[in-house]
């Protein structure tokens, strides 16, 4: 699959949640994804992290199917989306780390924030 840099990508969640919900991330190129991952309500270990796209420990671990939810509007938007995701990921005190909440601080909130960045 050819994924444009700056795209919001998604994969099915594990377990029963996978029927209704998807896990989202920002594709930054070179087979890498930045995503916000937490295990559950108020997970203090939740982190924005950069990972590989596929493979055993990747975004699409266990060969989950990946699809594109949104493509960037243009090259400038793609760069801005990636820069915002990288900036958040590199800041250990960002507004997401350690603050996972299924309703308000989740992977969807993270990618929405990055995608809506001014460019």
Image (cartoon, helix red, strand yellow):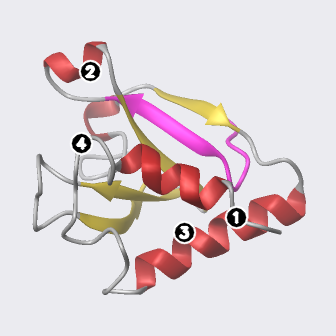
Callout 3: 10 Å neighbours few (<14), some, many (20+)? Answer: many
Mark 3 or 4: in front is 4
The residues colored magenta run 1-12
Which sits earlier in the primary sequence, circle 3 or circle 4?
A: 3
Which sits earlier in the primary sequence, circle 1 or circle 3?
A: 3
The Cα atoms of the two marked residues, 2 and 4, are separated by 14 Å
Mark 1 or 3: in front is 1
Position in image of residue 21 (x %, y %): 33, 24
**Does dot 4 land on a helix, a strand or a loop?**
loop
**Left or right of residue 16: residue 88:** right
Name the residue tied to disc 1: 117
Position in image of residue 72 (x %, y %): 77, 48
Name the residue tied to disc 3: 85
Callout 4: 10 Å neighbours few (<14), some, many (20+)? Answer: some
Which sits earlier in the primary sequence, circle 1 or circle 2?
A: 2
The Cα atoms of the two marked residues, 2 and 3, are separated by 24 Å
Q: Is residue 5 magenta?
A: yes
Residues marked 3 and 4 touching at CB (< 8 Å): no
**Left or right of residue 23: residue 116:** right
Instruction: Residue at 22% x, 65% y: name it.
Output: 99
Callout 2: 10 Å neighbours few (<14), some, many (20+)? Answer: few
Name the residue tied to disc 2: 18
Residues marked 1 and 2 touching at CB (< 8 Å): no
Mark 1 or 2: in front is 1
Check the picture and name the quadrant holding the C terminus.
bottom right
The Cα atoms of the two marked residues, 1 and 2, are separated by 28 Å
Which sits earlier in the primary sequence, circle 2 or circle 3?
A: 2
**Does dot 3 land on a helix, a strand or a loop?**
helix
Position in image of residue 25 (x %, y %): 47, 49
């Amino acid at each position: 699959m050819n994924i444009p840099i700056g795209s919001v990508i998604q994969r099915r969640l594990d377990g029963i949640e996978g029927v209704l919900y998807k896990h989202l991330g920002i594709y930054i190129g070179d087979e890498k994804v930045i995503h916000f991952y937490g295990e559950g309500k108020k997970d203090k270990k939740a982190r924005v992290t950069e990972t590989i796209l596929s493979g055993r420990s990747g975004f699409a671990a266990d060969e989950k199917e990946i699809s594109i939810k949104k493509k960037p509007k243009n090259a400038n938007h793609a760069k801005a989306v990636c820069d915002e995701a990288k900036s958040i990921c590199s800041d250990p005190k960002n507004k997401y780390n350690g603050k996972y909440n299924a309703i308000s601080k989740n992977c969807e909130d993270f990618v929405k924030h990055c995608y809506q960045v001014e460019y």
